[in-house]
Image (cartoon, rainbow, N blue to C red):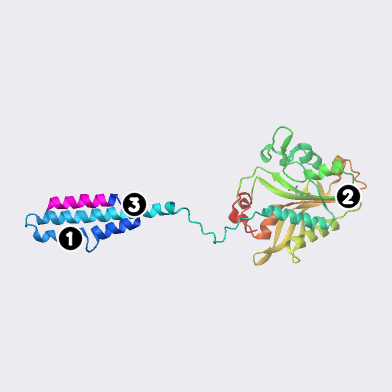
């Protein structure tokens, strides 16, 4: 009887090996594993087996049943995974396509374009200057003396003895006045660089907008009026402007610029830059007659404006190119 059992196994395994499609597999299942199949029939042998043979036969039948069952499942898996290949790629041409992901301008570019527009309405042109500057434009002509702490090599990205990545867009004031006779009315936007440790509010590269207005009899009233217009355009009619007395080498008098704006559910004074009346020493550096010409200047951090405007709490997000962040604006 054990012999018959092993014959049955050989026969069944051969039959299974020959199966190439689902129909044949189903026939195999019916023939061998079905309720009227050969395995069921073999169970009946137990009745006729001698007492001695019975345990071994019973065990053998069980093992055979498990093997055939496993073999059947394995084959089913093979046929299943092979199926799409045999049928060719499944393409449903009636399904709507994937919408292409549209690009957009970076949130900082959007804010810069808006700033340009706001100041253009007040008659300001856009001027540009290089990011790699010399000491004259970054310091000397801006009345920043050699011993001034801002010139410490540790606080600047020096390239060689005379060249560095600009730390402020005030450099463009000098470049414009060197090349253009007064009056001038410009804004300049771009990157500036400082060796800062990166955290939620510091980056070694960020953006500034610089403003310069030179004409006859320009006063602080003009400066404040311009800044109020800017604050209303960017932060809404509720925004207020406060000038806090301060010091910059290139302006006299100088002030810190605070704007009172909505921060979440309340209004708060936020410092966003510096400003003042152009120092006569700067006019002398560029060959403007300080007896005839007067002017104001200001410089603001663009990231600060954008962060307040959109409630962005970490400056690093601007530069990570994470689409999940960028697509929100
Ligand atoms: N350049 C200054 C800075 O980066 C900001 C600034 C202050 C610009 C006063 C100005 C100004 O034009 O008048 O901190």
Asked if residue 11 is among those painted magenta in the image, a careful observer would answer yes
State how far apart marks 2 and 1 are (Cα).
112 Å
Q: Mark 3 points at which residue?
A: 20
Q: How crowded is mark 1: few (under 14 residues within 10 Å), some or many (20 or more)?
A: few
State how far apart marks 1 and 3 are (Cα).
26 Å
Q: Position of residue 245 (x, y in %)?
A: 78, 54
Main secondary structure along the magenta-highlighted residues = helix
Of 41 and 120, nearer the camera is 41
Of 317 and 100, nearer the camera is 100
Nearest-to-viewer mark from 3 and 2: 3
Residue 294 is marked as: 2
Which residue is located at x 82 percent, y 58 percent? 121
- Figure check: 256 above or below 157: below
State how far apart marks 3 and 2 are (Cα).
93 Å
Q: SS of the residue at dot 1?
A: helix
Which residue is located at x 87 percent, y 41 percent? 284
- Mark earlier in primary sequence (1, 3): 3
Residue 41 is marked as: 1
Nearest-to-viewer mark from 2 and 1: 1
Is residue 254 at least partly visible in the picture? no
Residue at the left extreme of this rendering: 51
Q: Where is residue 316 in the image (x, y as percent from the top left)?
A: 61, 50
Whether tag 3 and tag 2 are in contact, CB under 8 A, the answer is: no
Of 248 and 3, nearer the camera is 3
Is residue 43 at least partly visible in the picture? yes
* Magenta extent: 1-15
């Amino acid at each position: 009887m054990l012999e018959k059992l092993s014959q049955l196994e050989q026969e069944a395994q051969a039959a299974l090996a020959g199966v190439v499609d689902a129909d044949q597999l189903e026939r195999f299942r019916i023939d061998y594993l079905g309720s009227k199949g050969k395995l069921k029939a073999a169970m009946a042998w137990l009745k006729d087996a001698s007492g001695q043979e019975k345990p071994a036969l019973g065990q053998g039948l069980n093992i055979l049943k498990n093997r055939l069952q496993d073999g059947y499942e394995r084959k089913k898996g093979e046929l299943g995974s092979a199926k799409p290949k045999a049928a060719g790629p499944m393409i449903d041409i009636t399904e709507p396509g994937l919408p292409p992901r549209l690009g957009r301008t970076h949130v900082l570019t959007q804010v810069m374009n808006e700033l340009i527009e706001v100041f253009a309405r007040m008659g300001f042109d856009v001027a540009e200057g290089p990011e790699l500057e010399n000491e004259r434009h970054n310091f000397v002509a801006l009345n920043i003396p050699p011993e001034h702490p801002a010139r410490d090599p540790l606080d600047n990205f020096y390239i060689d003895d005379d060249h560095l990545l600009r730390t402020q867009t005030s450099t463009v004031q000098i470049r414009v006045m060197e090349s253009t006779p007064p009056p001038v009315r410009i804004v300049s936007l771009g990157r500036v660089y400082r060796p800062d440790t990166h955290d939620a509010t510091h980056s070694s590269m960020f953006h500034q907008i610089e403003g310069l207005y030179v004409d006859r009899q320009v006063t602080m009233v003009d400066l404040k009026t311009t800044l109020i217009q800017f604050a209303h355009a960017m932060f809404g009619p509720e925004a207020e402007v406060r000038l806090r007395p301060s010091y910059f080498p290139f302006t006299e008098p100088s002030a810190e610029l605070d704007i009172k704006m909505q921060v979440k559910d309340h209004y708060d004074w936020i410092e966003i830059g510096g400003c003042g009346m152009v120092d006569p020493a700067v006019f002398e550096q560029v060959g403007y007659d300080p007896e005839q010409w007067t002017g104001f200047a200001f410089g603001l951090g663009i990231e600060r404006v954008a962060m307040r405007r959109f409630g962005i709490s970490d400056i690093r997000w601007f530069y990570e190119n994470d689409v999940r962040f960028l697509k929100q604006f």
